[in-house]
C-alpha cells in the first residue's frame, strides 16, 4: 500500500505489520493529492498540488525514480477529487 500527504513524501506500507516500509521523496514541498499503482504493481505514480507527477519502478524494498513531469496547466479544485470516464480505448476523455 502507498500513501501521500502534506509533507510531499510517498510512503510505502508493510501490510503485515502496519508499519511504514519505505519513503519515496518527491523533491517537492507541495502536498500530494494522488498515488496510484500500475495494474501489475511494478510502477507507482504520484501527483502533487503544484501539478508535478513522479513515477517510480518498484523493485524489492523501495523504488527507483523513473521520471518527473510538471504540468503547464494548473487547475485548483480546492481539494475535491475529480474523474472523467475514458472511452473504450482510453485514448481520450
Image (spheres, rainbow, N blue to C red):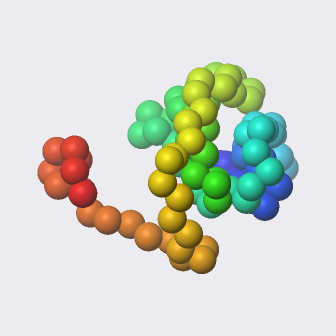
Determine whether, in the image, residue 78 is placed left or right of residue 73. right
Question: Residue 60, percent across and down?
Answer: 69, 23
* Residue 16 seen anywhere in this rendered image of the structure: no
Query: Farthest front residue?
Result: 72
Of residues 16 and 81, the one nearer the viewer is 81
Q: In which quarter of the view is residue 7 placed?
A: bottom right
> Does 24 appear above or below 50?
above
Determine whether, in the image, residue 15 is placed left or right of residue 20. left
Of residues 92 and 71, the one nearer the viewer is 71
Of residues 45 and 76, the one nearer the viewer is 76
Question: Residue 20, percent across and down?
Answer: 83, 46
> Does 50 appear above or below 25?
below
> Does 64 appear above or below 18?
above
> Does 46 appear above or below 7?
above
Question: Residue 71, percent across and down?
Answer: 51, 46
* Residue 33 seen anywhere in this rendered image of the structure: yes
Tell me the residue at 64%/55% (across/down): 50
Tell me the residue at 74%/55% (across/down): 30
Which quarter of the rendered picture does the C terminus lie within?
bottom left
Tell me the residue at 73%/40% (across/down): 26
Looking at the rendered structure, the number of numbered marks drawn on it comes to: 0
Determine whether, in the image, residue 60 is placed left or right of residue 23. left
Query: Farthest left residue?
Result: 88
Amino acid at each position: 500500500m502507498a500513501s501521500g500527504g502534506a509533507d510531499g513524501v510517498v510512503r510505502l506500507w508493510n501490510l503485515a505489520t502496519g508499519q511504514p516500509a519505505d519513503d519515496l521523496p518527491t523533491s517537492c514541498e507541495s502536498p500530494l493529492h494522488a498515488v496510484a499503482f500500475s495494474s501489475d504493481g511494478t510502477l507507482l505514480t504520484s501527483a502533487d498540488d503544484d501539478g508535478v507527477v513522479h513515477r517510480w519502478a518498484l523493485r524489492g524494498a523501495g523504488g527507483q525514480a523513473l521520471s518527473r513531469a510538471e504540468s503547464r496547466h494548473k487547475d485548483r479544485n480546492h481539494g475535491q477529487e475529480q474523474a472523467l470516464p475514458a472511452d473504450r480505448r482510453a485514448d481520450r476523455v
